[in-house]
Amino acid sequence: MTARPVIKAASGGAVRHLTQTVVIFTILLISTAAATLGLALLANASGPFDRAFAAQHGADVAATVNSARATAAQLAATSKQPGVTGAAGPFPEVTLQMTQPAPPGAGNAGPPPPPGAGNAGPPPPPPTATVTVIGRGSPGGPVDDLTVTSGHWARRPGQIVLSSNVPQSGPTISPPLGAKVTVTSAPGKPRLTVVGYARSITGTAGAWVVPAQAAVLRPAGAPAAAQMLYRFASAGSAAQIRADVAALKAALPAGAVSGTASWLTAKNQATGDSAIIAPFVVAFALIGLVMAVLIVANVVSGAVVASYRRIGVLKSIGFTPAQVVTAYLARVGAPAVAGCLLGVAAGNLLAVPVLRKTATIYSVGGQSVPAWVNAAAPLLMCALVGLTALAPALRAGRLSAIQAIATGHAPRAGRGYAAHRAASRLPLPRPVSIGLAAPAARPARTAFTLAAITFGAIAVIFAVGLDASLAQAAQGQTHASTEQVQLQGGPADASQQRAVVAALRAQPGTRRYVAEATTTVTVPGLTQPVQTEAFRGNAAWTGYDIISGRWYTGPGEADVNTAFLTQTGLSVGDTTTITAGGKPVTVRITGEVFDLQGKDQPALLTSWQTLGGAPAGLTIAQYDVGLKPGTDPGGYANGVNQALSTTQAPFFASPPSSGPFYTIAESLIAVLTLMIAVVAGLGVLNTVLLGTRDRVHDLGVFKAVGMTPRQTIAMVVCWVTGPALAAAVIAIPAAMILHTVTGRAMLAAAFTGTPAAIADVYKPAEMALLALSALAIAVLGALLPASWAARAKTATALRTE
């Protein structure tokens, strides 16, 4: 027999069972897309900064040069210095003060608010940001190849491109494209149109304009400056960077180099962020990959097993075992290959927004799907299809025609009967008991279904817990739920401080407040000064999460972060002598708090009196304000700013913000969870679809004896109810363990211990609701084939193969 009958049998089977062919194609498309995204996330989570730095020719050193002391020719000559492997510049550099426009309608105050509303008067102007602006003709170049993340590069004077690097501190501006920013420090206060956002791998600037614009923007009396960017043969350590900078300064006139920035600073920050975010990205990627493998194996093997009756017919008309195997490998392989190819394209499209989020978190210019991933994902899925289809096809090829027809017509004799007898004794409607017992007839298929639902439920429960932990971590850093408004500024003299206190007391929404001074102290065993917060007043309410111990209660006591304890070797309860304002101060460590200072920087929190107060040189830099219930933080801040506008107090009030890191991380969790839940639901859909095909004659009989469409839907949905309940029992502890492991890994990467508020986010009542996610995935996946079964006519069901 030639190959023509085999091809005809394969194509005829695909067309005859079009629904199953479409399901195979769809499952392979989505699974390959999930595998592509999962592998891309895994690849990009490994050393993202180093790879981006190499790809974008990052600058080892960005040097600010006094243009009056070094000529362009002298600067150009430094590119030929020994050890210099690349240079770019000089680019004109200016440091400017900018404000962005108020949002639409902000200037229309409307009718005055009622007395006591706390937001009287027009809103104050937005805060001013200090921005380093570079004059650069194009984003590309031999050093620091910029990535334009939105919009386009500045093409003429009057246009500006802002940096999209994640800000670490200080006020920032981020107006939409097309908006105008006002350069308040430049002559004439010009307004520039924002035409784009760009990202530098090492954060070499806050904004860019065309070179001609930079000279116009330079403030009156400010010296002309330029930026030079360098790459060196040896720049892997701080010592090597210092040697490179020393050689650079020696090659230029004395005083020409006024400042330098090392790539190591950007690397440390980006590496810390990637280390924090990588554990949960890897966890989701692995769940997605395992889900894809399980569901593809279930779909393909189930499709072949469901066709045993047809295989028996083919054998009865003369097909050899080899021809049977070839026919069914071709029948399954054709839609699978098509799904894999389109799945790679879909995975790349899905990866664009996801990798844009991870690139922002990792502080790199951009991320993409590696070429090897685009090759590996479809090859992996095609190989999986071939292997999972081959085993049942070979088994079918060895069966006789009669055995194949009998096996395809119904599950193995005796399988599931005990379950049906047990279910029939339950006080349940008969369609429900039949549905609950059905999974016992196909234990292998049920196991695949159970695994798919379990992984989907784990992803949902894990995501909810991780999202709650991230929200609590953001609160632990910003204290937004306790310090609803913060006033930042200073230094201020005594009269200005009194003006701030008066403004706070005058606001009807003020519940409590505490003043805060920022300083540094030296600690035995540490080579660098320790960032220290000294509170003037009771600060126990400010919202610091306690990891161990307690909040300090009086002078001579202090709380510290994990990095402090790790680097000093001290423990909660120990006493140490610090030096503050040149005087030794003995303090007892009463607690370990969740406080991130540059990821691995020690921090100390104590009272104003412990450090000697104003006589020791402390000055108030911030006021933390707790509001009465129902008070709007934005309106309250506007009221305080309006009150301070008539004084000289250098403070600005605003609600605290955690920055984009947590927002992006939470949105990334939502995207990945939705993807995994969809894949799990499709796995359930396939299982139920195969089940309806297995039991199509039974459905016809049930309909013939009076089963209604609603009863049919209930019976089919109950096919997956049992596996869903079992999946919930498995998923809850598994997700909690995964949350604990991932959370600890993330916090360990941030050099901090784990507060109970961040770790213990699962509450009993919430867990009961989250357990329903398994049932929801199962029911949603089963509804479509259940509806098909309910709509099928009795005669059609009885005649269907």
Image (cartoon, helix red, strand yellow):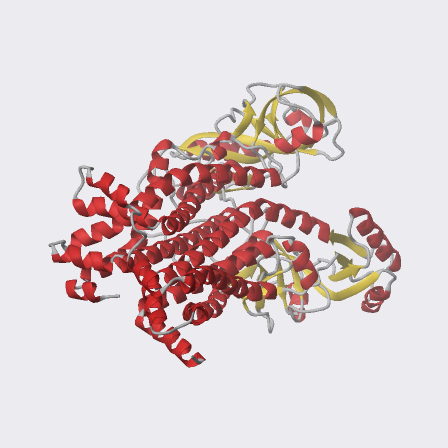
| Res. 196 in view | no
Q: Is residue 603 left or right of residue 471?
A: right
Q: Position of residue 515 (x, y in %)?
A: 54, 31
- Residue extending furthest left? 706
Task: Please state which of residues 328 and 593 is positioned toward the viewer in this rendering.
Answer: 328
Q: Give the quarter of the image for residue 54.
A: bottom right
Task: Please state which of residues 748 and 640 is positioned toward the viewer in this rendering.
Answer: 748
Q: Position of residue 270 (x, y in %)?
A: 63, 50
Rendered view: 542 above or below 691? above
Going 24% across and 48% down the picture, which residue do you hit?
A: 435
Rendered view: 564 above or below 727? above
Task: Please state which of residues 312 and 288 is positioned toward the viewer in this rendering.
Answer: 312
Q: Position of residue 720 (x, y in %)?
A: 31, 48
Q: Position of residue 444 (x, y in %)?
A: 39, 50
Q: Give the quarter of the image for residue 689.
A: bottom left
Going 44% across and 79% down the picture, which residue do you hit?
A: 3
Going 11% across and 54% down the picture, which residue do you hit?
A: 706
| Res. 447 in view | yes
Task: Please state which of residues 607 and 348 is positioned toward the viewer in this rendering.
Answer: 348
Q: Give the quarter of the image for residue 15.
A: bottom left
Q: Considering the image in quadrants, where does the C terminus appear? A: bottom left
Q: Considering the image in quadrants, where does the N terminus appear? A: bottom left
Q: Is residue 352 left or right of residue 714?
A: right
Q: How many marks?
A: 0
